[in-house]
Structures are given as C-alpha cells and as structure tokens.
C-alpha cells in the first residue's frame, strides 16, 4: 500500500513539474535570448573586444618589426634612435622648464658604514618629491644610483627594496631612493581623517584624467626622476660621470623610461618590467595608466625602444622566468636589443639575467645587479649578497606628518597641474566655437580621428539565430558581423501590425537583455508601434569582457588610438545599416536611445552618421571637461567610456552641436560624480550647443529634461 502511494506521489510530482515547465514555456519565461549560445565560433564572446584591439596593436607592431629587420649598420640604428627620441618627446612631452629644486635635508640617520639623508625637492614648483639619500662612509666622489620603486605602499622603505638598496650601499654606491607618485609620502588624494588615500588605485585615477587631455601620466614619473638626477649632480660626493638607475616592477617601468630620456645616466638596470607589447598583450594585458604612452603602439613603440635609444650605453635586463611579465617576450626583446648593440660594436654592454622565480628580487638577481653596476660604473668589488639590517618605516620618513599633502601649503598634485594645462586646451576650444560652422566641421574630423571611429560598410552580413513569438510582436535574434573578427548580438522586436516602422536603436550598458523581458521598457516601445533593435555593441552584454580586463582593454585602446567609444559607435552604425536594409523599416525614421555610460557612444555615432535621425540620451555624462576639471569623479564615466585626447579638440557639447538641426533629447544629465547635473552646470556646459540650435532656428529640437515619466514619451517626441 505504501509503495503504491509513493508511486502515485511521484507521478503527481512529475505532472506538476511538467505543467510548470509548460507554463514557463508558453509564457515566454523559458526564452533564451543569448544570441551566441550554442555556436562554437562565438564561445569566446567575453574576449572579442581584447582580441579586436590586440589585432590592431599587432598590425602596428608588425610594421615596426619590419622596419627593425631592415636595420643593419650603426648608421641605421643612429637614425632609428633619432626617430625614436622624437616620438618619445612628442608622445610624453613636452616637459616643463627646469625650476629651482629648493632641496632640503629634513633629517639625518647614522648607521654603521653609511648614513641616510632625508631629502625633499620640488620637481616642479609646489610638486614635492620625497626621498632618502644613502651615502656610504668614506671620502672622494662615488658612483650614484637613482632607485625608483614598484607599486608598494611603503615605496623604497619596503623590506624587499631595502635589501637591494643596502646591498648596493655596502658595495660603495650612493643610492637615492625616491617616492613615486601615490606611494610612500606622496599620496595624491590624501584624506587627513583616514590618514590614507581616499581613492583606491590612484595611479590610474589621475592617469585617466590626464589621458582625456591627451597626456600620459608617465610624464610626471619621468620628470621626477630627471630632477632626481639633477639633485644628485648638486652633491659633491657624486661622480657625475658614473650615474645609474634601477627599480623593480613599476620601478622597472620608471627606470626604463628615465634611462631612455636622460642621457646623463650611464647605466640602467630595469627589473621585471621588460617584455614587449606583443607578449604583454597576449598574456596579462596592459596595466596602469603611466605604463601606457598616449598612442605609443600607434607610433611604433615597444619595450625594446627604451634600451635601443640609449645604445651603446650599458644596460641590464632583469627577469624572473615565472614572472607575470612574459619571459618569452623578455628574451625576444633582449635578442632585438642585442642586435642594436652589436651594430655599435658593444654587444658586451647589453646584459641579461634571469632566475627561476616569480615577481620579486632573489639573491641571484641582486648579485647580478650589483655586478652590473660594479663593472659599468667602475667600482670593482665582490657582488655577493650580504646580510643587511632593515630599517623601520618611520626611521626613513622624510616629512613630519608622513605625507607631503599636509606638510606644506599650496601643494601641487598631478590633478592640479593637469587641470591648469587642460584649461589652455579648453580656452582653445572656446575660441574655436566663436566660428560655429568651421568649428563643427573640425569637431567632426577630430572626433573621428581621436576616437578611432571607422564608418561601417553599407552591406551588413548577419546570421539569423531564431525567433520568439510574444503577445503582439516577435523577438528576432541576429548576429551582425562587426568591423573585425567579432559579432554584434542583436535582438529585434518587431510589431505584428504594420509594414513600415519607425525604428529605435536601444543601447543599455548592461546589455540588450536588461530591458528585454515581457512588460519591460522595450516592450513599452514596441506596443507603441516602434520596431526596436537592441544590440550588444562590442564590450557589452554577451560580448562584455571579464572585469579584470576592463582596464587592459582601455589602455590598449589608448596605445593604438582606437577608443572603445569609437569602435562601439561604429557598431551602432552597423545596426543602422542593418535596419536600412530591411523592407519593414522607414530608414528616414531611425532614432537611437542610450542610457548612462553608453550615451557618449551614441552621441559620437550620431554626430558622425547622419542616418541617425534623432537621439535620446538618458543619464548622460554632461562633458569630459567635468571629469578632468574636478578632483573627484565617478570612474564608470572614464576608462572604456572616454576618448583619450578628446579635450585637445572637442567635448561632448560640441558633438551635441553637430547634431543640429536633428532632434536630441537630454534627460537626467549627470555630472562627473554621476549625480544629477545642476542647472548652473547645464547652463554652462550647454551654452554652445544651444547657440548652434538657435543659429539654425531649431531651438525646440534640443530638448533638455530633468526627468521623464516614460521613455515612450521621449522617443515619441523624437519622431514628431
């Protein structure tokens, strides 16, 4: 009896599961709107963006490699050096004029066999650099080494870095360890209440502001090092003919850069940075704003250039075979650099040392570095690693407070300096705006150039992936082929009634599925009779990268001059052309609506593509200017959603002006903190586009709304 009851219970349960599944199916909840699902060629959707960017980077590197392969003689390499020096100065510079260092010794610590002088100098007026000068006992002039630190909070005061510094000091070298920006005592966003930074990841935070202005923040790191060499040359203990530079990780980056830019440095030993852009992009991707020169790869630069430009001066490449910086790339770079030194007849001046280790110093690496400087800075001795006594952090503190921000008045930061320089760019834009028509023509040219926008071809290839029927409309799924080896997943919502529809391109930063469910905002538009195209432009939805690679994607776009905004704007153009190819779309009535971070994308797309008849931007950033000219900003509006170099020629309000006389609705405009923009800010930023619409007697076509009851009314206005 119990067995029969159990079987009956199981049958009832299975029947309930069947009914529930069938209910889900017929109600549409079982829909799978993932276009890439079950298609082998598209299984790597989250890497499509980085592969697309890398492919373009590799194309530029191929051009460079071909040029390098043709260099045979010393004269060939000298000409290459001249070219690279010019590229470096144009890419990173211009550097400021040299002003008084105003160097001060804030304290002295005496130790057995050496002393430490605590130094502070101004690499620019009010831009304070803190450091410690380690001076061995003895008389006479000695070789000196500038030591720059990697991304450690303590900077050169960390135990690992002290072991390297004090080993060099015990060998008789003067070592000047300085704090890089945002480390040690040089926090750029210091919060006195927390006694710490108010920003996580300062390097890229101020670096992103610099990049929008067309400047690499690496310039500041390099200049601090150059002025550090200036300080060393003021010291009577230092032999000016025997100067070196070294550092590990981020310090490896800085030491390579400083070595390349400062001819006074005789020998350089960058540690665990050297690889090569090709292998770097193939592996972990590009990191940190200062490590990415504005349009660096576009201009033919890679890691090898920072050594080759200084041939035949002695250089040492130091690496760990298991480091996250590719050892294969390091070996390939060494092989290329060695050919340059060979052409100069000084092959012995380029060295390589590696150890089977990850990221950090080992005894073998420290001994190799010591031997390199002993040989090339003419201070012979035993390079053997020695036991050292690590000093406490506070013992090496230069300021009384632990940070320059609250130790001096009128302290400059990267933000404050970049703000002043950016104001000059904004003044030029403002002057250009006085001649409206020529300015708008120039804006379109520059927006296309700086964003890396490529106008899509008229013919759009696609793969139809299926259709779902809903109440009153259908949902069609397509994969549109993009400009490269990627696809744009697209959902097309088609009303049942009608044969020639006004079309709405609907773009959400969270992806096409966000508002695609029955009863959602897209359905509201379809029920009003609009055909709606909801794409996942490259970098969103099904083709969004893993969060870890967001920064890398942006920095590769900076290096290649192909902004993600520009690529996505091209994708929008692909959707436009796809709609224009359909018989059920009125191609004279194509509107685009975007939300939040995707608003600059649609604005670029519409400014550069007249086939988009009108646009509605919901929650748009009001200007790139607001990011750069304010100390704090919301990072969601930078990186992948900003165009590096934009403020050298235009801003978002200029693109709004390019829309005239077409309609544009700006709803819930946001300031740099992603908060509602004030009336004062709106009046200030939008005065130019308002003047453009006024000039063309279409002021009603620029619609600025604090909010909207529903997007249907906003879209309806666009089609009136």
Image: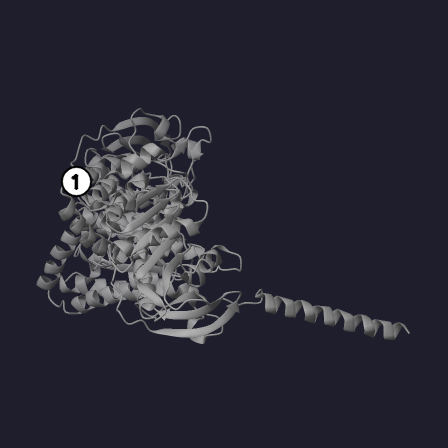
- Secondary structure of the residue carrying tag 1 is helix
Rate crowding at label 1 as few (under 14), some (14 to 19) or many (20 or more) other CA atoms within 10 Å. Answer: some
Q: Is residue 22 left or right of residue 214?
A: right
Identify which residue, 477 or 167, lies in the foreground. 477
Q: Is residue 29 visible?
A: yes
Q: Is residue 394 left or right of residue 660?
A: right
Whether residue 183 is situated above or below residue 82 in the rendered picture: above
Whether residue 296 is situated above or below residue 668 in the rendered picture: below
Image location of residue 75, percent across then percent down:
8, 62
Image location of residue 524, percent across then percent down:
48, 56
Identify which residue, 10 or 548, lies in the foreground. 10
Identify which residue, 542 or 602, lies in the foreground. 602
Return the residue at label 1: 428
* Quadrant assignment, res 483: bottom left
- Colour setting: one colour
Q: Is residue 310 left or right of residue 628?
A: left
Q: Is residue 538 visible?
A: no
Image location of residue 393, percent across then percent down:
43, 35
Query: Where does the N terminus fall, quadrant-wise?
Result: bottom right
Image location of residue 174, percent across then percent down:
28, 39
Whether residue 550 is situated above or below residue 687 in the rendered picture: below
Number of numbered labels in the structure image: 1
Whether residue 17 is situated above or below residue 102 in the rendered picture: below
Identify which residue, 165 or 124, lies in the foreground. 124
* Residue at the outermost top position: 409
* Quadrant assignment, res 319: bottom left
**Residue at 10% from the left image edge and 66% from the top image edge:** 73
* Residue at the outermost right position: 1
* Quadrant assignment, res 494: bottom left
**Residue at 40% from the left image edge and 70% from the top image edge:** 479
């Amino acid at each position: 009896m119990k067995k029969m009851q159990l079987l009956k219970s199981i049958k009832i349960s299975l029947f309930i599961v069947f009914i529930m599944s069938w209910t889900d199916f017929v109600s549409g909840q079982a829909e799978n709107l993932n276009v890439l699902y079950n298609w082998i060629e598209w299984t790597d959707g989250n890497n499509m963006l980085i592969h697309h960017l890398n492919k373009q980077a590799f194309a530029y590197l191929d051009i460079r490699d071909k040029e390098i392969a043709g260099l045979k003689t010393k004269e060939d390499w000298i000409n290459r050096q001249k070219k690279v020096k010019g590229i470096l100065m144009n890419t990173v510079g211009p550097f400021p004029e040299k002003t008084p260092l105003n160097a001060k010794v804030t304290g002295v610590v005496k130790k057995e066999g050496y002393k430490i002088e605590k130094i502070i100098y101004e690499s620019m007026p009010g831009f304070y650099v803190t450091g410690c000068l380690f001076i061995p006992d003895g008389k006479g002039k000695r070789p000196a080494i500038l030591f720059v630190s990697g991304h450690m909070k303590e900077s050169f005061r960390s135990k690992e870095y002290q072991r390297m510094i004090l080993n060099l000091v015990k060998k008789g070298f003067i070592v000047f360890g300085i704090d890089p920006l945002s480390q040690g005592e040089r926090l750029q966003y210091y919060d006195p209440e927390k006694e710490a930074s108010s920003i996580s990841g300062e390097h890229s935070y101020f670096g992103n502001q610099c990049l929008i202005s067309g400047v690499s923040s690496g310039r500041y790191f390099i200049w601090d090092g150059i002025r550090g060499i200036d300080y060393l040359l003021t010291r009577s203990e230092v032999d000016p003919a025997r100067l070196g530079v070294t550092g590990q990780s981020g310090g490896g980056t800085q030491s390579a850069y400083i070595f390349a830019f400062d001819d006074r440095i005789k020998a350089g030993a960058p540690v665990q940075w050297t690889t090569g852009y090709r292998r770097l992009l193939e592996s972990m991707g590009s990191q940190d704003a200062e490590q990415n020169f504005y349009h660096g790869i576009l201009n033919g630069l890679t890691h090898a250039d920072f050594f080759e430009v200084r041939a035949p001066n002695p250089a040492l490449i130091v690496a760990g075979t298991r480091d996250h910086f590719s050892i294969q790339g390091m070996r390939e770079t060494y092989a290329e650099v060695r050919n340059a030194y060979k052409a100069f007849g000084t092959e012995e001046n380029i060295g390589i040392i590696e150890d089977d280790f990850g990221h950090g110093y080992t005894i073998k690496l420290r001994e190799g570095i010591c031997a390199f400087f002993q040989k090339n800075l003419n201070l012979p001795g035993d390079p053997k690693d020695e036991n050292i006594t690590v000093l406490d952090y506070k013992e090496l503190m230069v300021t009384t407070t632990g940070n320059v921000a609250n130790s001096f008045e009128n302290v400059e930061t990267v933000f404050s300096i970049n703000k002043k320089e950016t104001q000059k760019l904004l003044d030029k834009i403002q002057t250009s705006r006085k001649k409206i028509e020529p300015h708008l023509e120039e804006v379109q040219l520059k927006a296309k150039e700086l964003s890396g926008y490529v106008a899509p071809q008229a013919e759009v290839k696609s793969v139809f992936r299926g259709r779902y029927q809903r109440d009153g409309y259908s949902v069609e799924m397509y994969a549109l082929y993009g400009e490269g080896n990627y696809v744009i997943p697209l959902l097309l919502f088609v009303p049942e009634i009608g044969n020639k529809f006004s079309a709405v391109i609907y773009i959400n930063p969270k992806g096409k599925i966000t508002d695609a469910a029955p009863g959602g905002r897209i359905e509201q538009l379809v029920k009003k009779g609009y055909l709606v195209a909801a794409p996942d432009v490259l970098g969103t939805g099904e083709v969004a990268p893993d969060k870890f690679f967001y920064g890398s994607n942006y920095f590769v776009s900076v290096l290649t001059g192909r902004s993600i905004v520009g690529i996505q704007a091209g994708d929008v153009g692909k959707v436009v052309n796809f709609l224009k190819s359909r018989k059920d779309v009125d191609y004279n009535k194509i509107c685009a609506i975007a939300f939040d971070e995707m608003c600059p994308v649609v604005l670029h797309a519409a400014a550069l593509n007249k086939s988009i008849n009108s646009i509605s931007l919901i929650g748009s950033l009001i200007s790139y200017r607001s990011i750069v000219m304010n100390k704090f900003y919301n990072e969601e509006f930078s990186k992948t959603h900003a165009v590096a170099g934009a403020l050298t020629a235009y801003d978002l309000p200029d693109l709004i002006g390019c829309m005239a006389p077409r309609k544009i609705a700006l709803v819930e405009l946001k300031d740099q903190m992603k908060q509602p923009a004030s009336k004062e800010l709106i009046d200030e930023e939008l005065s130019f586009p308002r003047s453009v619409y006024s000039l063309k007697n279409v002021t009603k076509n620029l619609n600025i709304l604090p909010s909207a009851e529903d997007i249907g009314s906003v879209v309806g206005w666009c089609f009136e």
